[in-house]
């Protein structure tokens, strides 16, 4: 993995302790877990028609250098790149402690995934 290709700054966010609102409903909150420099390798935008509405989404792949912290990233975390929030759908190790490949998906406001 070449250092010069790591040109995107990404932030990994992890779910923090659940808080409750005045109606005693759980509120989802995310705390910053780690910052990495990453290489963005792939981008696949798609658009589909479901339940009477158009849903747009983009799938991206990033590669980061291996570290203990990077190895602990899971699909239950979130990734933020250039102000856009991605749900992590896959994390794989590249080689033997060379890097980590992260696959994330972001949805448009109209086709928001819940």
Image (cartoon, grey):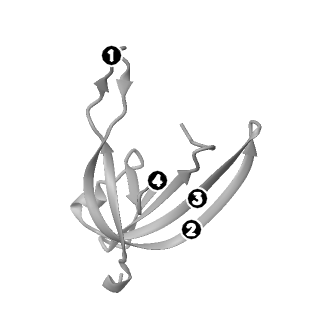
Q: Which residue is mark 4?
A: 86
Q: Is residue 30 left or right of residue 84?
A: left
Q: Is residue 102 above or below residue 112?
A: below
- Label 3 packing within 10 angstroms: few (<14), some (14-19), many (20+): some
Q: Which residue is pictured at 37% across the width and 48% down the height? A: 77
Residue 109: quadrant of the picture: top right
- Tag 1 and tag 3, C-beta contact below 8 Å: no
Outermost top residue: 23
Which of the numbered marks, if any, corresponds to residue 43? 2
> Reading the chain from its start, which is encountered first: label 3 or label 2?
2
Label 1, label 4: how far apart the Cα atoms are = 29 Å
Q: Earlier in the sequence, mark 3 or mark 4?
A: 3
Local secondary structure at mark 4:
strand
Mark 1 and mark 3 lie on one chain; the one further toward the N terminus is 1
* Residue found at x 48% / y 60%: 103
Asked if the residues shown at circle 1 and circle 4 are in contact, with their CB atoms under 8 angstroms apart, the answer is no
């Amino acid at each position: 993995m070449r250092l010069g290709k790591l040109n995107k700054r990404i932030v990994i966010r992890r779910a923090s302790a659940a808080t409750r609102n005045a109606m005693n409903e759980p509120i989802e909150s995310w705390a910053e877990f780690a910052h990495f420099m990453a290489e963005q390798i792939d981008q696949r935008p798609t658009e589909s028609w479901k339940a009477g509405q158009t849903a747009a989404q983009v799938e991206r792949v990033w590669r980061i250098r291996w570290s203990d912290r990077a190895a602990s990233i899971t699909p239950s975390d979130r990734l933020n790149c250039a102000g856009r929030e991605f749900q992590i759908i896959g994390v794989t190790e590249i080689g033997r402690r060379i890097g980590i490949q992260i696959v994330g998906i972001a949805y448009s406001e109209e086709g928001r995934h819940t």
